[in-house]
Image (cartoon, rainbow, N blue to C red):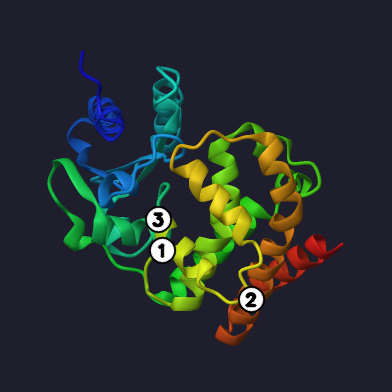
Amino acid sequence: MTTTDPATAARAVAVEAARTYQEAFGERLIAAYLLGSLSYGGYSPAVSDIDLAVVLADRHDDDPATFEALGESLRERSPLHRKLSVFWGSLPALSRGEQDGRFPAIDRLELAEHATLLFGEDVTAKVARPDSEQLRVESARFAVAVLATDEVLGEFARPKRLLADPVWFTKAVFFPLRFGYTGTTATGRAATNDEAITWYLGRPDASAAPLVHLARQVREGRPLNPAEAEPELLAHLRPLYVQYVEEETARLREAGAPEDLVAAFTSWHEQLSS
């Protein structure tokens, strides 16, 4: 009896999804790509998403509804299909450095530099690469939208979801590391989890190191043990976020970022400190 490699199984789901979108969009679908860990390596069956990019020839008004409906249908097929994360946009918008679908700056840069073509015409050379300032601002806006929410803030005192979901547990720990690494090093690209972990653990003020070590082990396949994880979360998660928000706020001010973004980070810091 043979066992399918987890990355191979995940890739098969990506191909199946890409063909589903090809059936729906026909010749308008120019290319489909793998992004993320399935493309550059380091796929973790325990926590990694299956990142798929779809490039269309143009943009129609009903495209968002089509992607949403097909995405819901695909994710119902199996637990592995639920890992699908689909980025999409038109080539004209991508060539202008814009998104007219779901394609944030970090993912557009990943498409241009690290994508793996599944089928179609390779158009990565035509994709505009966002500069460091655009990456910083969009990453900061994404961080606020995803992490400065009542749901996440509530987890600092009562980590119910984090203790029940290893995917959300690792993302909650690694997101501030990845955003912090990207902002501090100004590499002009998105950080991988491994890069961000190495960067953080190498800091002299890495006070949340025990939590980061545990999250890395869970990412590598160690079962999430709530009795072990809860005290680490209660002791280290809030300080980890406070450190990131304080440092990113200072960087945004220094870079002359939009006032509304600086204000959002200031408010986030106040919420974390209350």
Mark toward the viewer: 3 or 1: 1
User: Could you tell me which quadrant the C terminus lies in?
Assistant: bottom right
Q: Residue furthest bottom?
A: 254
Q: Is residue 161 visible?
A: no
Amino acid type shown at disc 3: Gln
Mark toward the viewer: 3 or 2: 2
- The answer to whether residue 7 is left or right of residue 147 is left
Mark toward the start of the polypeptide (3 vs 2)? 3
Residue name at image x 20 percent, y 48 percent = 116
Mark toward the start of the polypeptide (1 vs 2)? 1
Q: Which residue is mark 3?
A: 99
- The answer to whether residue 157 is left or right of residue 5 is right
In percent of width and height, residue 108 lies at: 34, 58
Please name whichever residue, 137 or 187, is drawn nearer the observer in this view of the structure.
Answer: 187
Q: Which residue is mark 1?
A: 195
Q: Which residue is mark 2?
A: 247
Residue name at image x 41 percent, y 76 percent = 132
In percent of width and height, residue 258 lies at: 61, 76
Please name whichever residue, 69 or 194, is drawn nearer the observer in this view of the structure.
Answer: 194
| CA distance separating discs 3 and 2 | 28 Å
Q: Residue furthest top?
A: 1
Residue name at image x 76 percent, y 50 percent = 234
Q: Is residue 134 above or below residue 60?
A: below
Please name whichever residue, 145 or 37, is drawn nearer the observer in this view of the structure.
Answer: 37
Mark toward the viewer: 1 or 2: 1
Would you identify the image quadrant in which residue 54 lies? top left
Would you identify the image quadrant in which residue 142 lies? bottom right
Amino acid type shown at disc 2: Glu
Q: Secondary structure at mark 1?
A: helix
| CA distance separating discs 3 and 1 | 27 Å
